[in-house]
Image (tube, helix red, strand yellow):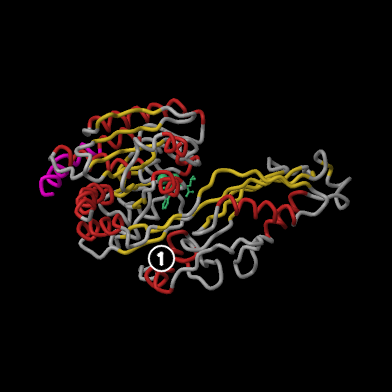
Amino acid sequence: MYKTHQYQEENKQRFLDELFELLRIPSVSADSAYAKDVKTCAESVAENLKKSGLENVEICPTQGNPIVFGEKIIDKNLPTILVYGHYDVQPADPLELWETEPFEPVIKKTELHPDGAIFARGSADDKGQFFMHVKALESMINTQSLPCNVKVVIEGEEEVGSIHLGGFLEENKEKLACDVVVISDTHIFSNSVPTVTTGLRGLCYVEVEVTGANRDLHSGLYGGGVPNPINILSKMIASLIDDDGKITIKGFYDKVEELSANDRKELNKLPFDEETYKKSIGLREIQGEKGYNTLERTSIRPTLDVNGIWGGYTGEGAKTVIPSKAHAKISMRLVPDQDTEEIKRLFTEHFTSIAPKSVTVKVTPHHGGNAYVLPSSDSGYIAAKKAMDKTFGKETLPYRTGGSIPIVSLFEKTLGAKSVLMGFGLDTDAIHSPNEHYGLFNFYKGIETIPYFFQYYVDGK
Ligand code: BES
Ligand code: MN
Ligand code: MN
């Protein structure tokens, strides 16, 4: 391992320069205006894989954005680790809130990153993180210390629901066969409290439309005598969560896994500080489901949130109108063992049933996926924990996070492989927000830790 680390030290600056090149490509998957950049980014990822010593590198076309594949098979009898990541990023807007250009990476120091952090869209989610694997692989390959086979899958549609990856897995079961998947697309608790993510929440995302009259109406001539879809939608939405913070959809909690007393204790070992949390997001007071603390509410409990709501007149000045339609986008974060399809059905039934007869309700589902847990007895978890213990010089704790990576449950279903979520970001890195950044400490710590993970995983087999 000494040689591998020495190689990393000697090539530190180059690793960063190469990441910067990747960050300059605006590979926004949600906006078709960037389709060309997405393609360019896939090509750049493929070039990077080749340069790092991976073989059979391919840009696999899909109905959507291409998937980049590469591998290094050293001995069929050795275990195979599959690295997954995504090269697509979230849109950068609102642009005016960025202090520097989103696609021109710069290094700036922050309170939590005194050694500096890379500011750019995708720096933490997920280019900076999957690139750690590429560079860790390069350092293992070039120092003859890769201990097993490796396959790499970097997709370009994670931020829009991994629409075509499921099919790709189905069609390439043989090619992607592996013992374990490792993903760096989550965060650690803090730079002084290393964690391995042992759970992700699932997601059920719907769009609702409430329609009243067949056209917008004058709010003086008709007001008082007709249903107002925005008033009605607001009331319907408000009724979805009660005063105890419980979701009122019938059957919503039926399958929710209650954590064992021990797992709950384990989760609460994390030194969570409510005051720091509130301060970091500018809140005076927090709220949530009764009977659970913030750490639990944001990881092991399901949620329902309106992500966007619109309708009627929102332009300058006042227009007196009763709109014909009102809309909202609603996300539900799910926990084991809630099923995204079932929750979709329960939501639709409930939402339709609470609508007054005067309006029509339409529910359109978007992408989703189920929650995921990695038991701390899993050999992948054990290897990741040992690796982080080693490089952080501290005891690594299990951490369940509230975000979702829907494809993780499909890796298990299709390839029969567990995913180890060994991310190195911080929850304050502003992913999906203006001024996204990724700590240099985190970037290099990841590159240093990954080879240990590989070694300990093989040792444990
Ligand atoms: N990397 C994130 C998910 C994440 C971040 C999980 C931090 C845990 C900790 C991923 O790119 C993401 O943004 N996922 C989406 C879901 C997807 C279907 C758009 C999410 O969680 O909203
Ligand atoms: Mn991500
Ligand atoms: Mn993301």
**Residue toward you, 337 or 285:** 337
**Residue toward you, 274 or 339:** 339
Q: Evaluate whether residue 35 shows in this view.
A: yes
Kindly identify the amino acid type of the residue bearing the numbered disc 1: Thr
Q: Is residue 279 left or right of residue 77?
A: right
Span colored in magenta: 1-16
Is-magenta flag for residue 459? no
* The image quarter in which residue 209 lies: top right
Please identify the dominant SS of the magenta region.
helix
Q: Is residue 389 left or right of residue 178?
A: left
Q: Which residue is drawn at the image coordinates 18% and 45% (left, top)?
A: 147
Q: Identify the secondary structure beneath mark 1.
A: helix
- In the image, residue 433 sits, relative to residue 292, either above or below, namely above
Q: In this view, does 447 lie to the left or right of 143?
A: right
From the top left corner, tell me how far across and down residue 139 is, in percent: 18, 41
- Residue receiving disc 1: 276
From the top left corner, tell me how far across and down residue 86 is, in percent: 39, 40
Q: Mark 1 Cα within 10 Å, few/some/many (few <14, many 20+)? A: few
Q: In which quarter of the image is ligand 3?
A: top left
Q: How many labels does the image show?
A: 1
From the top left corner, tell me how far across and down residue 155 is, in percent: 40, 36
